[in-house]
Image: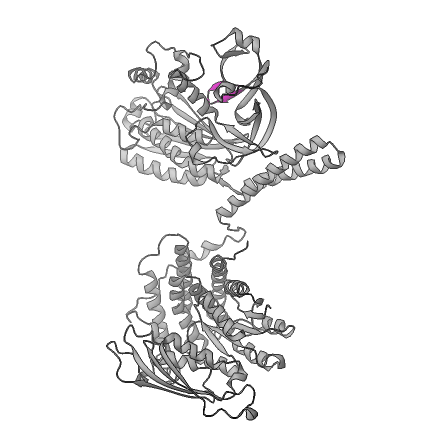
Amino acid sequence: MSTPNPSITFLHEAEDLLVQIEEIILEIHSQDAPSEPVNQLFRAFHTIKGSGAMFGFDAVAEFTHHVESVLDKVREGEIPFSDELSELVLASKDQIKKLLDVSQGGDPVEPGSSERIIAALSEFSKGSAGAPPPVAAASAHRSPAPASGHQQFSIRFKPNPEMMAFGTNPVSLLNELRGLGECTVSANHQDVPTLADIVRDRCYLSWDIQLFTTAGINAIRDVFIFAEDGSQIDIEAVGAPEPASADSSANISAVPKGQEKTLTPAKAEPAAKDSSSSKKASSNNSLVRVPSDKLDRLVTLVGELVMNQSRLSQVASRVDLADVTAPVEEIERLVSELRDNVLGIRMTPIGMAFNRLKRLVHDLSGELGKQIDLITEGAETELDKTVLDQIGDPLVHLIRNSVDHGIESADDRELHGKQRRGRIRLAAAHVGSHVVITIEDDGRGLDPDKIRAKAISKNLIAPDAQLSEKEIFNLIFLPGFSTAAQVTSVSGRGVGMDVVKRQIDSLRGTVSLASQLGGGTTTTLTLPLTLAIIDGLLVEIGSDQFIVPMALVTENVELHKADRARNNSRNAVAVRGDLIPYVRLRSLFQVSEGEPDIEKIVIAQQGEQRVGLVVDRVLGSHQTVIQSIGRFYREVEIVSGATIMGDGRVALILDVAGLVHSVRHGAAHGTHAANQHSPEETARR
Amino acid sequence: MGKLIMTADDSASMREMISFTLKNGGYDVIEAEDGRDALSKISGTEAHMLITDLNMPNMDGIELIRKVRALPQYKYIPIIMLTTESQDEKKMAGKAAGASGWIVKPFRSEQLLTIAKKFLN
């Protein structure tokens, strides 16, 4: 908050002024003498121009200048505020909006659009043709300083003796002259009286100045404009100007004002008429636009608040004083409410991503000569913008797959007794703390035998591996697997479903497939609502703490030392009849101290698979504010982030999918977790 | 130290910029949104300088300068007006009303500070 940013303030200000301008125009439409509203209009454009130029919005300032000039004439009664003009001013207002958007990274304006409006505006200015030039001939037109060419001026300046009393310091005038160029100043002091006669605040001096400058005579006159009254100021050009003809006293009489910037040719077409259509565009009164980085900052702050609150709760529970506990509990409630509300602000309807896919299906089906309808459901389903931003590509990939590999050609479909038009259903819905996105097509479905054969040929599974149908489908997610018999331009080349899976995994989501040969395929993405704060299960190994995302945890069981010894090297535990493989985090993280007799296995469900994580202790649930870890750790796949605990310690957040993958990988190379996997296990995922 | 400068401008971004610049230069600043606001605020204080925009609602800069100059305590303070381009007739009007100088927009913050120093030190 310390350093203000006037540019940002200007953008807000301009935005408000533009709204105000539109209101005024719509109100004064065809009034006869709308003098005050026109003044308001003038001032609004004037401010946009002046402040715009101040803060570097030159294109905006330059454009607005033309509108302002026309309005100035309306204000002076030289031209009427006609309907045509008001349309034109509206169009100008829209144009300014576009120019402002450009400065904020928006699309560039249509080339020539500004010029067209400017040309039309200058037509209006000329409408006052018959009227005398608004400015008396004496008024000097400030032409831009001649590009080059120095000229010498001889200046005699004998100020009004009273000038100092009016706050004008003659020395500052001389300094200004020095700013114009090389300057020799000599003071004449013959008029200075004897000390006894000196009147305070009177100026007795006069000066002779030789100025060698590129600036014109007008610039010099400007310096003295406040000193003219009662002063003697003689400015004389000495000798001829050098090459590029500089201003000389001969051309002071100047061009009449209004014409100074009418650079555009006279033959102007009428103003762009498309302005009215955009009138309704900015009618979102009840919405407040906030830059997303402000929101991110807010989320970060809430995160810090949540962390400190958990610290406070920890202290409170240790102290155990009713006077403390009650307010702390209240704060806990408020903080969690605040958290939900703040995260709620970032929630964005998924429909935005859906719209893009509609266009995609339309284009692709045309390209492939297929007839496909895309049906969307639950477009209003909201999820965190950061998640939404990252599921675009996976969704595109999955939809492409359905269009390309899933849906058959119309003739094929008819042959199989299906409707000629294929159908893809894209649906989103909230399920608990997750968003479930389903992509369902009624195409040819996946052929388990083909997938299996291909996986064997690619050495992904053993030829005799016993796999369920579901496991076979999941082979598609393995790196390097591609089902398309030939690569088409539509679906990726080699970049397959493994990329989709990796992206969804990185969002802590899951992806699963179901398919019926000849009946179609359904892909289901399950995504967390937010990436900023999650419910975590806090566990401990030795003295280190870790977080397991609560959404993945299904249950906790005990692992006795004796049991572990008995089924040594199998690293699997039977939970109600199911054999679940487990990973000992103690060995993974190489913790040796204080191994307890009874360890805990946290059973986590990652997609279709369950895996046990063996820890020393389960400490309980924890509001986990996810902090990303430095880029040096980005390659560490077993950890997805870190969080700061109430006591200031850091706990790593386990990436269950990565962890399972890493242990597998390690096992395959015989480096990690000394257990052999059956081919089935290796094949899963 | 901390001489007091009043700045009158209907543009919030301009006020922000002027005020920030002058405060950084060690001056105290009072902001006013238009001429009327400025006149009422300046009457109740003792400003050492007035920097005013010309085009403002309610009371424009020229009238503000005239009225401020008419106040006995402000007969001699420097009054700077901000003009958008060097509109000579505006300058003349401002001068006639009692302005001591002007700054043409756009200007840089250093220029503003230089001018403030020039008049106040």
Q: Is residue A319 magenta?
A: no
Q: Is residue A615 above or below residue A266?
A: above
Camera-side residue of A667 and B67: A667
Q: Is residue A605 magenta?
A: yes
Q: Is residue A538 above or below residue A16?
A: above
Q: Quadrant of residue A562?
A: top right
Question: Which x, y percent locates residue A55?
Answer: 44, 62
Give the side of residue A166 with respect to residue B107, left or right: right
Question: Which x, y percent locates residue A106?
Answer: 39, 52
Residue A139 visible to an observer of this rendering: no
Question: Which x, y percent locates residue A102?
Answer: 39, 55
- Looking at the image, which residue sits at the far right? A322
Camera-side residue of A491 and A234: A234
Residue occupying the point 53% across, 68% down = B9
Q: Quadrant of residue B108?
A: bottom left
Q: Is residue A260 above or below residue A611?
A: below
What kind of secondary structure does the magenta stretch mostly adopt?
Answer: strand
Camera-side residue of A593 and B79: A593
If the image is split into quadrants, where does the C terminus of chain A sit?
top left
Residue occupying the point 42% across, 39% down = A353
Residue A184 visible to an observer of this rendering: yes
Q: Is residue A254 above or below residue B10?
A: below
Q: Which stretch did the figure color magenta?
A: A603-614
Question: Which x, y percent locates residue A578?
Answer: 51, 12
